[in-house]
Image: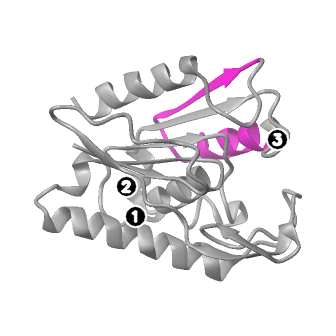
Amino acid sequence: MVLVILDTVGLLDCKYSSFHMSSFCPTAPTISVTLNGGVKMPSWFDLKSMSADGPEDEQGIKRASETVFQMIEEEEKRGIPSSRIVLGGFSQGGALALYSALLCPKPLAGVIALSCWLPLYKQFPYAAVGIAHDLPLLQCHGELDVVVPFKWGRMTYDLLRTFMSHVELKTYKVLCHTTNDEEMKEVGRFLEKVLP
């Protein structure tokens, strides 16, 4: 019934509202980002490296995840059970949605991870809560993405498959670090499946 789209810089819009589902797009707070020379910009957590093995802002990632859990609690107060909530996002927003969904102590309807990676991946599968095993996940990634390299998306998918039973990866040969109509149609199909 509710789709939470975690956006970082306003790239995605909430176009999935329908008669039985609403969506909202909280944007990231403005913080200093190490990777961009300390410039302040919208970011859920600090980005310190472009290397898969580089340092990560563990404290910031966990703090941002707590913010997501608070959003879920707010929806529950409005009468929406967590099992009717899908987390989704693009790039860093997708990374936060994925990380948060795997640690969420409440069952979710699903997670949509577009052009992203799994933060703090070395902590998995051990950090994931038990209910993450059955969480439906749609992961989409463009093969020409140079911002979040496609190999990171593939590595994330390979790791997730070791402890999740409903992981789906859709790839797009000529897609860079953006979305396209084909990908958005796939997102729509996924939403219809997990939020009938």
Question: Residue 104 has which mark?
Answer: 1
Is tag 2's residue or tag 1's residue first in the polypeptide sequence?
1
Q: Say what secondary structure mark 3 lies in.
A: loop
**Looking at the image, which residue is at 34% across and 34% down?**
16
Along the line of sight, which residue is nearer the eye, 127 or 85?
85
Magenta region: which residues?
152-173
Tag 2 or tag 3, which sits nearer the N-term? 2
Quadrant containing the N terminus is top left
The answer to if 194 sits in the magenta stretch is no
Residue drawn at (52%, 48%), measured in percent from left and top?
A: 89
Amino acid identity at mark 1: Cys
Which residue type carries mark 2?
Answer: Ile
Closer-to-camera residue (42/69):
42
* Rendering coords of residue 15 (x, y %): 38, 34
Measured in 3D between alpha carbons, the distance from the residue under mark 2 to the one under mark 1, in whole angstroms, is 9 Å
In the rendered image of this protein, does residue 192 appear above or below residue 13?
above
Indicate left or right for 79 with 50 as reference: left
* Marks 2,1: beta carbons within 8 A: yes
Q: Residue 161 lies in magenta, yes or no?
A: yes
Question: Of helix, strand and loop, which one carries label 2?
Answer: helix
Per the image, label 1 sits on a secondary structure element best described as loop
Q: Quadrant of residue 181?
A: top right
**Type of amino acid under label 3:** Pro
Residue where numbered disc 3 is placed: 149
